[in-house]
Amino acid sequence: MRAVLILAVKSAWARRLTLSVTLCAIALASALLFAVERVRHDARQSFTQAVSGVDLVVGARSGGVQLMLHAVFHSGSATHNIRWESFEAIATHPAVDWAVPLVLGDSHRGFPVLGTPPDYFRHFQYSDQRPLAFAAGQAFADIFETVLGSAVAAELKLDVGDRIALTHGMAEAGPGHDDKPFTVVGVLAPTGTPVDRGVHVSLESISAIHLDWAGGAPLPGLAIPAEFVRKFDLQPKEITALLIGLKNRADVFRLQRHINSYRGEPLMAVMPGVALDELWQTLGMVEQTLLAMSALVVVIGLAGLLATMLAGLNERRRELAILRALGASPRDLFLMLTAEGLLITTLGVAFGLGLLAVGTFFFAPLLQAHFGIILQWRLFAPNEWLLLAAILATGLVASLIPGARAWRMSLADGLTPRN
Amino acid sequence: MTALSIVDLVYRWPRQQAACLDIPRFEIAAGEHVFLHGPSGGGKSTLLGLLGGVAVPERGSIALLGGDITRLAGHARDRFRADHIGFIFQQFNLLPWLSALDNVLLPCTFSTRRRQRAGDAHAAATRLLTHLDLAPASWHKPAAELSVGQQQRVAAARALIGRPEILIADEPTSALDAPRQQIFIDLLLAEATAAGAALLFVSHDERLAAHFSRKIALADINRAAAVEP
Amino acid sequence: MPSLFFSAALIAALALLPVAHAAKGHAHGEGRLDVAIGKEQIVLSLELPLDAAIGFERAPKNDKEKALLAAAAATLNDAAALFLPTPAASCTLHSVQIDMPQFDGGAHADIAANYTFRCANPAALKSIETTLFRSFKRLYRIEVQRVSPAGQGAARLSPKQSVLSW
């Protein structure tokens, strides 16, 4: 039997050109399947880590998922702002440990600008209570100072001491705030969350650059030079959203109800973890469809293996008869063909995993930059073991068919093939 | 001792009324060389399949080296074939992707007995190839690159390695031209004699019978008139 | 690149999310449950449409309907049978508070219930099973919001999936 298996490998090597095409198909298909599963899994992981330190996100009434995405992931936009007084009223609630107001809406070369008090750097936590850390410099202390997320600094090659100008709105070429440039005073260490893509400035800075603006455009004929802005009251009147940390996390429902029934203006408090789960529930169908499609591609790849082996079997009929004359039993031939199929499947999956590793290497930075999804370098997650087992099992089933056919053929042919 | 002894053998193809083989008696002594004449389609392949143990008769016994192989289980017949019988067919005897030498060595990977009887298998193989007049230059070539004549000689070497007691050659020369047929049969007979093997040489070409001490027509021993489907 | 395709689909799906998703109204047959898991105790806040509990959402008109309402209140009061936390956590019922609707003329009426469990071994707490679906046949879904020291989450319970685990 060992002799037969060695012959199986040699025989497969002799047909390596044909088989390698099949092998490539299986490799690509399994790489696709693993990639979909990995992105799905890691997207959840990354998103969850990004919101894990925030107990409630407060904003004007809209969709909970939209509010969470806007406030934490800076995607989309807010329909309404909330009043500063509302922030003050909520921040003093006894259950609240910290409350950080956010003003969003401006950008620097596509990176979102976050107007926030310096407290933000002290309170915001991600992935299992890890606080933000500075890779260089420190928090801003004055207007026209900015702290960059690690990705902003890396991609735009900025460092402490550099000067940047902000843009109104999220468009890369929107109307500018060039007249009031900012100095980089700090760069944050990488977190793997949307913080990496943030350009952080003080709330007062946001007010300052919009002093001579109204309704989203510069006021014609009015230009207040940077050196004069301090003469104005820079306390913001409105904020976009509010991040809240609680003294006791279990109080979240109580405070949520309190904020949702706040009488000053219509507000909404969203539990970010809950909103994320709701998002996954909504995306569940999309995920399932993608997974199913990739699984189908793997099945097609394995069907290709089956077709190749069955087609090759007729040409190998004589080969099987020779082995039979040498003393191979029908069972040996069955094993030989099955082993060949399983070998191709296993090699294909192995190459697929190699492809996945290479793909992760090249595309992980892209995914992180554009979607905040961090692909992990790691061994298999339980789900992936399951996928692997499923592919190999399907490959085995596909290989049993040519094996069984070889068995039957050898019984019918005996020592002299009929072709 | 007889190498082969058939008694009261009857074989019928599935779903066929008439028997294809009905052989009351047929024997080959140990070391004897027998020419069996049979036109193609006369039950020849069926008989070889029965002797090789890949088919079993409806009734009767086939004793090879004294043991009735019809009483053995399938895997035991496969084992017996690997250990005691060397086959040479008309053509395409070799695995095209193995070298000539590796093809010769194949029986030693399938049968422990033949590996032991071969002694140093590699030396035995090169000796046989040399005796069968195959130049060392072609030993390591893939079998597919050899001429038909060379292939048949490699096939003979493979059948002979590990000195099986029974050699069965089925039209081994029909793919060769007349002068080469002559040379091939001479070499085969010489090596069979040297190995002490009984040889059953089956062919439709009666002219080849001249080389053999005993000549039998299949039609003479087979009472069945039916032809192979 | 497949992962890009996936992400594109993800982003597209984000954009298509209905605004109404978060603003949950009252739906017959659909309950809401807030689960707050603290260091030693679990607080469960249940909001159940009256329709899911007894089949109508108005003041009872006769003795039969009054009996139905009373039976629902009794079932909801029996918290130890209604919620089954992981046995290893050794949780015991600490308090129950049921607010039956006042029938103040609105179109809808909800029952609000608050349950507090105390757990001797909170580390072992991994799931809570509910028998609400067995008691209230008209109830087909419970939207759950959960918070624990480890984080937040949402889940959807149904007669087929009556175990909340995290």
Image (cartoon, helix red, strand yellow):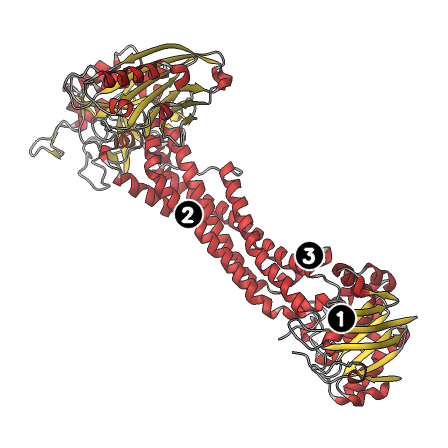
Q: Which residue is mark 3?
A: A5
SS for callout 2: helix
Above or below residue B98? Residue C86 is above
Amino acid under disc 2? Ala
Quick one: SS at disc 1? helix
Number of the label disc, if any, that sits on residue B50: 1
For the question of whether residue B75 can be seen, the reply is yes
Provide residue A143's location: percent of width, then percent of height: 24, 23
- Label 1 or label 2, whichever lies nearer to me, is 1
Q: Toward which corner of the image does residue C137 lie, by quadrant?
A: top left
**Which quadrant is the N terminus of chain A positioned in?**
bottom right
Q: What is the CA distance from the residue labelled 3 to the residue labelled 2? A: 34 Å
Kindly identify the amino acid type of the residue bearing the numbered disc 3.
Answer: Leu
Report crowding for label 1: few under 14, some 14 to 19, many 20 or more residues within 10 A (C-alpha). many
Q: Chain of mark 2?
A: A
Image height check: is A308 above or below C139? below
Question: Is A298 placed above or below C104 here?
Answer: below
What's the residue at 36%, 39% (across, down)?
A284
Q: In terms of depth relative to the viewer, which is nearer, A172 or B88?
A: B88
| Viewer-side residue, B54 vs C145 | B54
Residue found farthest to the left? A221
Which chain letter matches label 1? B
Q: How far apart, in angstroms, are the residues tagged by discs 1 and 3? A: 27 Å
Question: Which residue bears the numbered disc 2?
Answer: A292
Spot occupied by residue A173 in the image (x, y as percentages of width and height): 21, 42
